[in-house]
Image: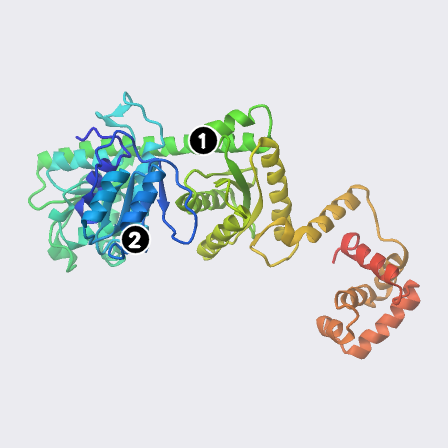
Amino acid sequence: MSQRPRASLGRVLDDLGSTLLELVAGDVDQPEGISALAIFDPLDEPVLAPRSLVLGVGVDPASGTLAPLLRALGDHGTAGLVVRAPVALTPEVRAAVQDSGVALIGLRRGATWAQLTALIRAMLAEGDIGVTSHESLGGLPSGDLFAVANAVAALLDAPITIEDRSSRVLAFSGRQDEADPSRVETVIGRQVPERYAARLTEMGVFRDLYRHHAPVVVSPQNLGYDGMTVQRVAIAVRAGDEVLGSIWAAMDGEVDGERTQALLDASKLVALHLLRLRGGADVQRRLRTDLIGTVLEGGAGARDALARLGLSGRRLVIVSAGLLDDHAHADLERLADALSVHLSATVPSSAVAAVGGTVYGLLPVVTATAGPEQRVARLAADFVDRVDGNLHAIVAVAPAGSDISAIVHGKAQADRVLRVMREGHTGLRVARLDDVQTLALVLELRDLAAARDERPGGAIARLMEYDERNNAGLVESLAAWLDALGDVGKAAAALFIHPNTLRYRLRRVVEVGELDLNDPEQRFAAMLQLRILAQR
């Protein structure tokens, strides 16, 4: 088994194999691992952590821009650049690879950038668990599913995939090209094709797989699926009564006692690693949440927490995110995970966690960049659009700051903005304080009035009392007229009444409320009370 670092370039190429990636030029046997995944945007200034793996989405290898890009990435300490294959290795490009120290990798035709991103993030996530060299399960690094997949493949002498209950591919071994088009499609898409999964369900394969402990054999002839030519042998992965997933081997021949025992042993080993991964992910989530919460509180441990997040001395923009509708804790965690994945593609060292019913993000920005809040707002708007089908998210963006006091102030400002979007009916999904400051002040005045038990007085109190006795609609008529800046036609349309009806009501407002509608001070006083003390 390879002893390369678990998140090194060499390990990525070994585990993802020739099905997805090919090394064009450069050294991948480097002792340092990959620190982050980033997407290159030619229209925006890159924010790259050292040892990043950069995805050159949209970079044309034949355009003549590849060599300058490699040299520029070398100045950032980038580990590698992935571009769409085929890549012509010209003398200029070869020299740029050598001078910059950036490995050049090609993404095979048929594989998508989204699929590659998901696979590499899974590998990086395994490295984030913090496994030390002496932590192992079955002689393999704890939680390293790709190492487990390769070990099981060697044991069975067949390419295998490890899948969850939804038939998503969690890891796969090498030698996938020895299988068939169906397996290649599954690996590239990191999901069993829907038409294939539907047929397996119809045949009762999943029912048998999860009901019994013995391996289940699926022959290509019985499946009747054109893309499958090699027999599949699957076994469920269990922890007690809980089914965690399954192992799928592409191998022909009889499943004899020796092969059955090998699959049973493999399923137990995979179960241990899946449990370790799940437990490690939970620990990491709690730790990150505690660290971000400590930073946002600004207490004695804030500086140490910021250092542990790797954000000391960085200029940060604080964002807060929530959901427009009522949501459960699980939805908030989904929002946090989705925002973390979205931001880390562009701002690799960002930190995101759900703290106290709100999702917060700390985004480092380049000190010399003008208007970082606008850039973050664009990222947030793109995120809101992407998740809109599943999560009705809203995001508030605060100004950038470099010290703990600025971070605490930014968090408070982001909370003010988020509250306005939740309660102020602005229609905005992404906002800064400049966008909603007046509404924020109105909400805060309402809080102050409620704390003092303030009630409407004067003209508004008289009108409310009259409406309560006579159901005359004077208060709502006055409010609509004020909102329409005195435009009777517009206000009447908003109330679905005839303009003459509104004119009559306004005369009654003047009489009952003893209110001079021609006096700007009295109009302002009425509007203020209606906004703050008599919420509609």
- Quarter of the image that includes the N terminus: top left
Q: CA distance from mark 2 to mark 1?
A: 32 Å
Q: Is residue 190 visible?
A: no
Answer few, some or many: residues within 10 Å of disc 1's Cα (few below 14, many 20 plus, some between 14 and 19): few
Q: Nearer the viewer, residue 473 or 188?
A: 188
534, above or below 291, in the image: below
248, above or below 468, in the image: above
Residue type at numbered disc 1: Gly
Residue type at numbered disc 2: Thr
Q: How is the image coloured?
A: rainbow
Q: Position of residue 171 (x, y in %)?
A: 25, 41
Q: Nearer the viewer, residue 140 or 58?
A: 58
At 83% from the left edge and 75% from the top edge, which residue is drawn? 503
Task: Kindly check if marks 2 and 1 are in contact, taking CB atoms under 8 A apart as contact.
Answer: no
Tell me the residue that label 2 is attached to: 65
Q: Nearer the viewer, residue 53 or 252?
A: 53
Q: Nearer the viewer, residue 379 or 185?
A: 379
Does residue 92 appear to the left or right of 231 in the view shown?
A: right
Does residue 500 appear to the left or right of 219 in the view shown?
A: right
Q: Which of the 4 quarters of the picture holds residue 47?
A: top left
Q: Position of residue 340 (x, y in %)?
A: 44, 43
532, above or below 364, in the image: below
Secondary element at image label 2 = loop
Tell me the residue that label 1 is attached to: 310
At 32% from the left edge and 48% from the top edge, which residue is drawn? 69
- Quarter of the image that includes the C terminus: bottom right
Q: Position of residue 401 (x, y in %)?
A: 57, 38
